[in-house]
Image: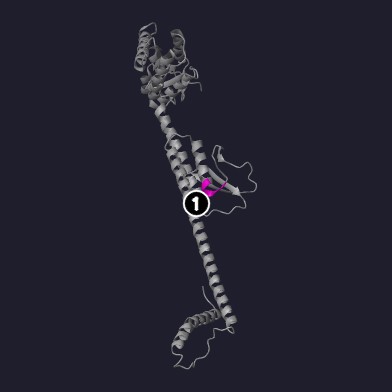
């Protein structure tokens, strides 16, 4: 605390007064001892009734100055304490906010690497962005028109910010929005918070697309767009376990295309692939919604029939599959007449394991194929039909 000139003069006078007070009794004591020898020559003490008023004033000023200085010092200490406390609380809130934000971000990254559905991931991302900005609303609009997150019912009176969600290969995966009241202050990290949400949204959407594509490739035949051998084996094992517990029955139909190699050799593999696609679509239409058609490889197919009552009912489904080849196939200007041999197996009559059932159905199919080749049909009839296709009407 800085003192004025008057204050310093008052302090000097007070100090002189205190020195005089202390020195006067000592001088009087010495004078008493030598009173008989000395004659008083000094001036009388100013500590008298005449000077009492100024002394009191000086002391009062001194007390006032000391009190004022103490009050100012206390106010300054209190202000600094409050400032330090407020700064500490602010830093604590920021650290807590950042810790919660990092926890949310880490949880989202874990969920992206899991099988959590994409809509739930986008909801978590919009919630994180809203928390980071302190906004009440944040949502994502997808290209298909879907709106995910917490979107306001009305946009009037709101300040809305937005940022496109870019695909790594180019294009847009959607748009991320955030909104708050129009009069609210702008957060200093507004852009960075929105950009972090966009990065996570891009990662989530593209990861889910990749995961979906990998799952599809692992379970479906890419040429014919029906289930593959892996998918059939997995579903067959599940069906065996279910039937074993419930005591139910189910059937499997094994299908082998007749003379398919001749199609490839005569027309080329491109026509052969298109023929397989047409065959798959036609057979799939002969099955019910709960049945499964799978391509085992090459020209071999299988159909799982989960609900079937008798062996004759399964045979009826197999005959439907076989008869669907009666009508010719039109493939890029060619008319192909094909055929198929089928065999059936019923759980548990023909086997209680996936291997036994497939082997039984395969054996039945070979019996049917052998009978067809060496039975009443004219030998080479199918080959002749394949190599002499009917030309389409022009």
Asked whether residue 369 is drawn in magenta, I would say: no
The relative height of residue 377 versus residue 97 in the rendered view (above or below) is above
| Prevailing secondary structure of the magenta residues | helix
How dense is the environment of label 1, judged by Cα within 10 Å: few (below 14), some, or many (20 and up)?
few
| Residue 117 or residue 377, whichever sits in front | 117
Instruction: Report the span colored magenta.
Output: 131-135
Where does the image place residue 246, in percent across and percent down from the top left? 44, 14
Residue 166 lies, in percent from the top left, at 49, 45
Q: Which residue of the protein is positioned furthest toward the right in this rendering?
A: 156
Q: Is residue 167 visible?
A: no
Position of 244 with respect to 42 (left or right) is left
| 295, above or below 164, in the image | above
Q: Name the residue under label 1.
A: 93
Q: Can residue 129 be seen in this view?
A: yes
In this picture the colour scheme is one colour
Q: Residue furthest top?
A: 376
The residue shown at (56%, 79%) is 58
Image vertical order of residue 20 relative to residue 82, above or below: below
Residue 332 coordinates in the image, percent (x, y): 46, 25
């Amino acid at each position: 605390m800085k003192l004025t000139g008057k204050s310093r003069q008052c302090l000097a006078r007070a100090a002189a007064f205190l020195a005089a007070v202390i020195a006067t009794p000592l001088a009087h004591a010495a004078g008493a001892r030598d009173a008989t020898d000395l004659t008083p020559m000094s001036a009388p003490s100013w500590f008298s009734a005449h000077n009492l008023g100024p002394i009191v004033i000086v002391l009062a000023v001194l007390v006032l100055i000391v009190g004022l200085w103490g009050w100012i010092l206390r106010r300054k200490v209190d202000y600094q304490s409050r400032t330090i406390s407020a700064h500490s609380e602010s830093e604590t809130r920021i650290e807590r906010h950042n810790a919660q934000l990092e926890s949310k971000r880490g949880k989202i990254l874990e969920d992206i690497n899991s099988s959590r559905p994409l809509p739930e991931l986008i909801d978590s991302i919009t919630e994180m962005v809203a928390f980071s900005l302190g906004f009440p609303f944040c949502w994502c609009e997808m290209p298909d028109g879907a709106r995910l997150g917490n979107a306001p019912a009305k946009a009037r009176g709101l300040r809305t910010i937005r940022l496109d969600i870019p695909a790594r290969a180019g294009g847009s995966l959607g748009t991320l929005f955030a909104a708050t009241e129009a009069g609210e202050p702008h957060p200093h990290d507004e852009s960075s918070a929105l950009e972090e949400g966009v990065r996570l949204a891009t990662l989530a959407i593209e990861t889910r697309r990749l995961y979906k594509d990998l799952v599809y490739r692992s379970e479906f035949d890419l040429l014919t767009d029906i289930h593959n051998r892996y998918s059939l084996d997995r579903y067959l094992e599940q069906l065996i376990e279910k039937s074993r517990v419930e005591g139910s029955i189910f059937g499997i139909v094994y299908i082998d295309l007749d003379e398919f190699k001749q199609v490839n050799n005569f027309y080329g593999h491109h026509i052969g692939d298109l023929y397989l696609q047409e065959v798959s679509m036609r057979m799939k239409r002969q099955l019910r919604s709960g049945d499964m058609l799978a391509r085992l490889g090459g020209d071999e197919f299988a159909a799982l029939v989960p609900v079937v009552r008798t062996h004759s009912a399964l045979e009826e489904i197999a005959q439907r599959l076989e008869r669907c080849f009666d009508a010719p196939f039109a493939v890029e200007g060619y008319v192909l007449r094909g055929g198929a041999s089928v065999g059936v197996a019923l759980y548990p009559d023909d086997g209680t394991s996936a291997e036994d059932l497939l082997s039984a159905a395969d054996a039945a199919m070979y019996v049917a194929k052998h009978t067809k080749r060496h039975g009443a049909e004219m030998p080479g009839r199918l080959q002749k039909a394949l190599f002499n296709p009917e030309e389409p009407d022009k």
